[in-house]
C-alpha cells in the first residue's frame, strides 16, 4: 500500500528565504510563534467518497518541537485508502492540479471500490512529530510497531500543519509538497523567480505572485485581523482553480484562525472546512517537553530512516544490529506491547514468542563468548543495599495501592528499566571516564543525562501509565 505524505512547512521556513517577498507576505511567514501551544481543530470532508467525515486534530508545540495527533473521526477513521496502485490524488484533485500533458489513468468507481481498504483497517491515531530537526511519523499509534523518519531538508510527507498560517493556502488536497502554500511541486516550479504585485481590492490589501507563465497566486490581507490573509486564490491560465476564505478570532494577544473554507472554482459550496475549537498559548499546563515516547514510540518500535531501519530504545534511535544486541546480550526485552504485536504477526502466543527470544539469547551469548572470550552482560551480584530505583518503585506501589497485576507489571517495568540503565552504563563507562579526564562538561552531561532520561521516560512514565490505566478501567459493581 502506497503512503501519501501530508505536509505544510511553515513552522520551519527560515526568514532569509523570504527576503524577496513583499512585506505583508513576509510578516505572515516569519511571524514569531509561541514558546508552547495547544490547538484542537477539525477537518470536515464534503462530497466524494468521504462525505461527512470529520477528522479531529490536536497540535502541541514546545520550542521547535511540534506534535500533531490526527485522531480520526469518533471511530478513529480517516479518509478512504486504497491498496496498491491507488492514485496519489483523487480524480477531482488530479484534474485541478496535474499538468495538461499528464495522462494519468482515470480511476473509475469500479476500480476505486475494488481497491478500497476497509476504514477500520486504517483506524487509529496518526502522529506526526518534528523532533531534533527530523520529521517522525507514527501511524496507528495504538499499534506502534513501525514508523518513518526523514530529515526536514528532504522530507516529502507528514509534517504537522501550521494552522496559524493556513490562510495562505488556496486549496486543501490529499498530497502536498514542501512549501507554505500547499502547492504541488510541479505547480510551484519557478516560484523563486515570481514577480509580485500589490494593490488594494475591496478595501483590502492584495498581493499577487505570478510565475511559470501561467500561474497566479493572490492573497488579500485584512488589517482588522493583524494583517492576516482572509482570502487566497490560485489561477491557472487566467482561470480560477480554487480559493479559500479564512475567519479569525482573538486569542489573548494574537489573532488566530477560527475557520477556513476551501472552494473549487466551479462550486459555491466548500469541499473542505477547517474549524478550530480551542487554541491556547504559553500556558503553564502545556507540555514543556515532547519526545518520540510521547507520541507512542515504545522500546522496540522500529523506524525506517534514510540510513536504514533503526529502533527506539526509549532513549534514542539505534541501528537494528545494536538493538538486537541489547535484547539478546543484555536481556533488555522490547516493550510488552511490542512483544504482543510481534507475536501476533508471527502467529505465536506471547509465551511462545518469549521462549523464542530466550533461546535466541542463549545462542547469541554463546556465539559472543566464542568470538570475544568475554561476557559483558554479566554484572556483579548486588549487595543487600537496595538500588535507588528499587526504592522508588517500592514507594510508588505503597502510595498507589495497585492490584496484584499492576504490582507485577510495575516490577517488570523496574527490572527492564534497570537492565537498560545498566546496559548504557557499560556501553558509556569508558566514554564517560575519558570525558571526565578531558574535562569535557558537554560530553559528561550527555552521558550522565542518559541515565536520567531512562529514569524519567522509561521507568517513571511507564509506572504513571499504570496509575492512569487503573483510573480509566471500568469499576465492578459492589
Image (cartoon, rainbow, N blue to C red):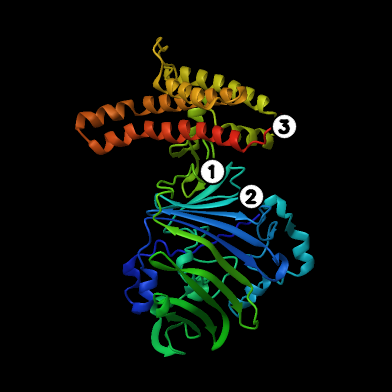
Q: Which mark is residue 124?
A: 2
User: Disc 3 and disc 1: Cα gap in Å?
Assistant: 32 Å
Outermost residue, front side: 478
Q: Which mark is residue 477?
A: 3
Residue 47 in percent (x, y) is at: 70, 71
Secondary structure beneath label 1: loop
User: Disc 3 and disc 2: Cα gap in Å?
Assistant: 31 Å
Query: Which residue is located at x 39 percent, y 21 percent?
Result: 388
* Mark 2 vs 1, N-terminal side: 2
* Mark 3 vs 1, N-terminal side: 1
Q: Is residue 93 visible in this depiction of the protein?
A: yes
Residue on which disc 1 sits: 296
Closer to the camera: disc 3 or disc 1?
3
Give the image quarter of residue 406.
top right
Q: Nearer the viewer, residue 403 or 109?
A: 403
* Number of numbered markers: 3
Q: Nearer the viewer, residue 293 or 380?
A: 293
Query: Which residue is located at x 61 percent, y 70 percent?
Result: 272
Secondary structure beneath label 2: loop
Q: Nearer the viewer, residue 373 or 176?
A: 176
Give the image quarter of residue 443.
top left
Closer to the camera: disc 3 or disc 2?
3
Q: Is residue 218 left or right of residue 446?
A: right
Q: Tell me: residue 202, above or below residue 270.
A: below
Q: Is residue 353 left or right of residue 394?
A: right
Q: Tell me: residue 11, above or below residue 345.
A: below
Amino acid at each position: 500500500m502506497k503512503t501519501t505524505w501530508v505536509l505544510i512547512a511553515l513552522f520551519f521556513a527560515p526568514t532569509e528565504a523570504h527576503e524577496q517577498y513583499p512585506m505583508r507576505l513576509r510578516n505572515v511567514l516569519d511571524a514569531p510563534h509561541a514558546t508552547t501551544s495547544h490547538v484542537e481543530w477539525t477537518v470536515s470532508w464534503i462530497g466524494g467518497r468521504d462525505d461527512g467525515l470529520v477528522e479531529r486534530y490536536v497540535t502541541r508545540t514546545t520550542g521547535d518541537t511540534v506534535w500533531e495527533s490526527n485522531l480520526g473521526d469518533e471511530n478513529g477513521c480517516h479518509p478512504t485508502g486504497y491498496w496498491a496502485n491507488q492514485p496519489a490524488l483523487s480524480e477531482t484533485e488530479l484534474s485541478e492540479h496535474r499538468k495538461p500533458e499528464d495522462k494519468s489513468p482515470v480511476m473509475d468507481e469500479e476500480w476505486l471500490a475494488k481497491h478500497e481498504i476497509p476504514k477500520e483497517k486504517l483506524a487509529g491515531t496518526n502522529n506526526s512529530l518534528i523532533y531534533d530537526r527530523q520529521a517522525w511519523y507514527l501511524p496507528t499509534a495504538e499499534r506502534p510497531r513501525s514508523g518513518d523518519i526523514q530529515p526536514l531538508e528532504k522530507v516529502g510527507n507528514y509534517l504537522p500543519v501550521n494552522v496559524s498560517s493556513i490562510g495562505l493556502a488556496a486549496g486543501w488536497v490529499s498530497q502536498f509538497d514542501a512549501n507554505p502554500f500547499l502547492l504541488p511541486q510541479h505547480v510551484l516550479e519557478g516560484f523563486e523567480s515570481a514577480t509580485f504585485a500589490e494593490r488594494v481590492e475591496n478595501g483590502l490589501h492584495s498581493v499577487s505572485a505570478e510565475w511559470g507563465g501561467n500561474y497566479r497566486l493572490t492573497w488579500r490581507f485584512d488589517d482588522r485581523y493583524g494583517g492576516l490573509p482572509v482570502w487566497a486564490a490560485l489561477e491557472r491560465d487566467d482561470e480560477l482553480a480554487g480559493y479559500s476564505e479564512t475567519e479569525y478570532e482573538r486569542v489573548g494577544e494574537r489573532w488566530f484562525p477560527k475557520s477556513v473554507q476551501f472552494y473549487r472554482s466551479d462550486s459555491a459550496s466548500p469541499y473542505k472546512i477547517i474549524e478550530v475549537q480551542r487554541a491556547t498559548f504559553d500556558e503553564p499546563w502545556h507540555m514543556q517537553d515532547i519526545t518520540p515516547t510521547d507520541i507512542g514510540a515504545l522500546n522496540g518500535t522500529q523506524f525506517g530512516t534514510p540510513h536504514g531501519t533503526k529502533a527506539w530504545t526509549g532513549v534514542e534511535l539505534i541501528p537494528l544490529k545494536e538493538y538486537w544486541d541489547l535484547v539478546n546480550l543484555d536481556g533488555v526485552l522490547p516493550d510488552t506491547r511490542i512483544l504482543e504485536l510481534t507475536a501476533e504477526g508471527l502467529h505465536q502466543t506471547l509465551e511462545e514468542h518469549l521462549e523464542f527470544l530466550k533461546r535466541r539469547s542463549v545462542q547469541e551469548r554463546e556465539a559472543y563468548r566464542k568470538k570475544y572470550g568475554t561476557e559483558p552482560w554479566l554484572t556483579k551480584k548486588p549487595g543487600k543495599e537496595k538500588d535507588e530505583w528499587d526504592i522508588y518503585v517500592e514507594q510508588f506501589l505503597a502510595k498507589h495501592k495497585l492490584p496484584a497485576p499492576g504490582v507485577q507489571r510495575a516490577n517488570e517495568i523496574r527490572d527492564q528499566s534497570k537492565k537498560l540503565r545498566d546496559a548504557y552504563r557499560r556501553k558509556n563507562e569508558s566514554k564517560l571516564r575519558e570525558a571526565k579526564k578531558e574535562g569535557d562538561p558537554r560530553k559528561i552531561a550527555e552521558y550522565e543525562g542518559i541515565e536520567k532520561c531512562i529514569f524519567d521516560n522509561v521507568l517513571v512514565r511507564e509506572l504513571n501509565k499504570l496509575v492512569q490505566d487503573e483510573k480509566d478501567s471500568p469499576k465492578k459493581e459492589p
